[in-house]
Image (cartoon, rainbow, N blue to C red):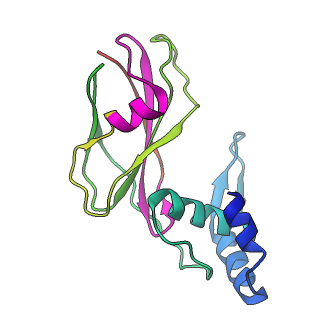
Amino acid sequence: MALNAAAWRALTAIQRAGWATLGLSMIRTDSLGQSYDLNGFLAYCSVNNNKLDAGDAVVSDAPAIVTPPSLLTATITLTAAAMSIAYTAGNRLFSFATPMTSAGRGFLADYRLIAVTAAAAASPHNIFAAYQARLGTPVVGTRIGFSLAIYNGGFKGVPFAVSQLVV
């Protein structure tokens, strides 16, 4: 975020105006269910933070808005020794997961970016090593939440959320 915030200052007035226009098309919903659009700085940071997370080059000029398709189904394989996501999509996938929680917990909100698939990645996507490095080895009987979003050109689609017990 700091890198993009600093880069924002180097943009020309015309580039900033382009990001401001893009921001008006980027609608978000807050925790109370109210919709709002982004200003130019937030649009710039949103697109370029996604690009950095995906390993793509940062852009100075505002791109045309892209609406990635929603992920309709995903099958999670989750054990103490394996974690993978089978999905059908032609685009890249951002995989977020929560730390392990009590099996009885229903609401999960502490999602962390675990992995982003390559452009031509095959399903299923094995995220066990990435999860283990970031949040530890899954423990049998705990619950892990997943939030999956299709990525395209700096934009993420509507997240597909699911939680599952480690078996």
Q: Quadrant of residue 61?
A: bottom right
Residue farthest to the front? Answer: 133
The residue nearer to you, when weighing 36 against 97, is: 97
Determine whether 40 is above or below 74 in the image: below
The residue depicted at 68 percent of the width and 63 percent of the height is 3
Is 156 magenta? The answer is yes
**Residue 54 against residue 95 in the figure, above or below:** below
- Counting from the top left corner in percent of width and height, residue 72 is at 33, 47
The residue lying furthest to the bottom in this view is: 14
> Is any atom of residue 86 visible in this view?
yes
Look at 73% across and 73% down and name the residue there. Answer: 8
Query: x%, y% of residue 154?
Result: 51, 66
- Quadrant hosting residue 90: bottom left
Q: Is residue 148 left or right of residue 36?
A: left
Residue under the point 22% across and 44% down: 124
Q: Is residue 162 visible?
A: no
Depth order, front residue of 72/164: 164
Magenta residues span: 129-157
The quarter of the rendered structure image containing the N terminus is bottom right
- Please indicate whether residue 143 sits to the left or right of residue 62 in the image: left
State the residue at coordinates (66%, 69%): 44
Residue 64 position, x and y percent, is: 53, 79
* Magenta stretch encompasses residue 23: no
Is residue 130 found left or right of 11 in the rendered image?
Answer: left
Name the residue nearer the viewer: 55 or 107. 55
Q: Position of residue 121 (x, y in %)?
A: 25, 56
